[in-house]
Image (tube, rainbow, N blue to C red):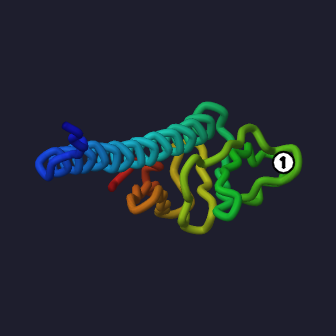
Amino acid sequence: MNRKKAITLAELIVSIAILLILSSGVVVSFSIAEGKRLEGAARSLVAQLKWARSQALSQDEQYVVEFDTSAEKYTICKDSITRNGSCDSGEEVASGPIEVNLVSFTGNKVIFYPPWGTADADKTGVLQNGTKQKTISVYQDTGYIEVVQ
């Protein structure tokens, strides 16, 4: 007797169900990774802002953090040569990439003043990775920096 081997409808349904379950797990893990990357980038940027503020306090010098949203990077300067509130030649002390999309940062810079580490104005920065966003706030009167969302 010559019997052809074939899969049954039940086997096909089980196979499709397994594939759907596995593929939904990939989508969920991608979404989690996207959120973790954004959270890490926000914490890193807050740490850099806090470092610039602490330098203004400890060195009794004005520090400026400038943001380039098109290149997605920041530059920290000790504004001791010209004291004009911007990064000039010879004033840069640190710089680095922003690992996610920097959508905006109010005025594209933050200035920290000695002796209290206050900021030039209330500032808000928005970071984005895919569909997720985080907002960073800098408060003028205290220089306090936090991730608010």
Can you tell which quarter of the image residue 71 is in?
bottom right
Q: Position of residue 136 (x, y in %)?
A: 44, 54
Q: Residue furthest right?
A: 89
Q: Residue furthest left?
A: 10
> Which residue type does callout 1 highlight?
Ile
* 147 left or right, relative to 63: left
In the image, residue 122 sits, relative to residue 61, either above or below, namely below
Q: Which residue is mark 1?
A: 81
- The answer to whether residue 140 shows anywhere in this view is no
Q: Where does the N terminus fall, quadrant-wise? A: top left
Q: Where does the C terminus fall, quadrant-wise? A: bottom left
Q: Residue at x 57, y 36 (%)?
A: 51
In the image, residue 119 sits, relative to residue 33, either above or below, namely below
Label 1: which secondary element: loop
* 146 left or right, relative to 17: right
Q: Residue furthest top?
A: 58
Q: Which one is nearer the viewer's eye here, 147 or 88?
A: 147
Q: Position of residue 116 (x, y in %)?
A: 51, 43
At label 1, counting other C-alpha atoms closer than 10 Å, the crowd grade (few under 14, some 14-19, many 20 or more) is: few
* 74 left or right, relative to 148: right
Can you tell which quarter of the image residue 69 is in?
bottom right
Q: Which one is nearer the viewer's eye here, 71 or 108?
A: 71
- The answer to whether residue 48 shows anywhere in this view is yes
